[in-house]
Amino acid sequence: MDVKNFKQLPILGILRGITKDAIEPLIESACASGLKTIEITMNTANADSLIRLALTASRKRLTIGAGTVTSMKILKTALSAGATFIVMPVLIKDIVTYCIKNKIPVFPGALTPQEIYNAWEAGATMVKVFPSGFFGPEYFKEIKGPFADIQLLACGGVKPGNMKDYFSNGACAISFGASVFKKEWLAKKDYASIEKAIKGFIEEYNK
């Protein structure tokens, strides 16, 4: 991942619990929408194979990373599959240290001021504030008061209608998952609705 490029369109799509047959149409939908960055969570069955398939399908149009990385073993599996950035639900220092040493962007999860501070001090590229939706954009404003330099990624509860509020209150990036990659749409292979939903985020960001 080129972090400078990510910051030009700081929107991250999260694929969790998807199947092999959905990868290619999902990648095409993401590319058609204008999205540039996707993570595949490592608690998805055969996640390493899915990352490889996504890399092939994207043909370098998307940056592909791994999410829900919770151990060094899972980290090595993700990197071997070709993931170029790492996202975690919490701070796991061994993973952050390894990523820093090997120049891999890393996004540990945190929520409280202490957790956010610890993740940033450990060397996070950005700190994923999760679950953001339970606290809202105003929480980011409060965090940025004492921690103006900490880069924050909002995860959970972000919608096109409130995305600008997150950015204006201090988020540097946002992410979305099941609200866009809906189970019912995936079951119906309704990739057009997924593409339209992603476009909603990007169009709102570019206004």
Image (cartoon, rainbow, N blue to C red):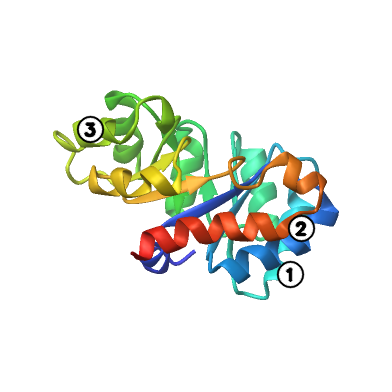
Q: Identify the residue position indicated by label 1 in the image.
A: 57
Q: Quadrant of residue 110?
A: top left
Viewer-side residue, 116 vs 73: 116
Describe the element under mark 1 as helix, strand or loop.
helix
Viewer-side residue, 150 vs 200: 200
Describe the element under mark 3 as helix, strand or loop.
helix
Q: Quadrant of the C terminus?
A: bottom left
Point out residue 150 in the picture as x, y percentages from the top left corner.
25, 43
Q: Is residue 125 visible?
A: no
Name the disc covering residue 136, or none: none
For badge 2, the amino acid type reads: Ile
User: Distance between the Cα atoms at labels 3 and 2?
Assistant: 37 Å
Residue at (55% x, 57% y) in the render: 198
Residue at (41% x, 69% y) in the render: 5
What is the crowding at mark 1: few (fewer than 14 residues within 10 Å), some, or many (at least 20)? some
Point out residue 67 in the picture as x, y percentages from the top left corner.
59, 44
What is the crowding at mark 2: few (fewer than 14 residues within 10 Å), some, or many (at least 20)? some
Name the disc covering residue 143, or none: 3
Instruction: State left or right for residue 1 relative to residue 73.
Output: left
Describe the element under mark 2 as helix, strand or loop.
helix
Q: Identify the residue position indicated by label 2 in the image.
A: 23
Point out residue 135 in the picture as x, y percentages from the top left corner.
35, 26
Viewer-side residue, 150 vs 72: 150
Extreme residue in the right direction: 21
Counting residues from the N terminus, which is met first, the one under dot 1 or under dot 3? 1
Above or below, 30 against 183 in this view is below
Residue at (66% x, 50% y) in the render: 78
For badge 3, the amino acid type reads: Ile
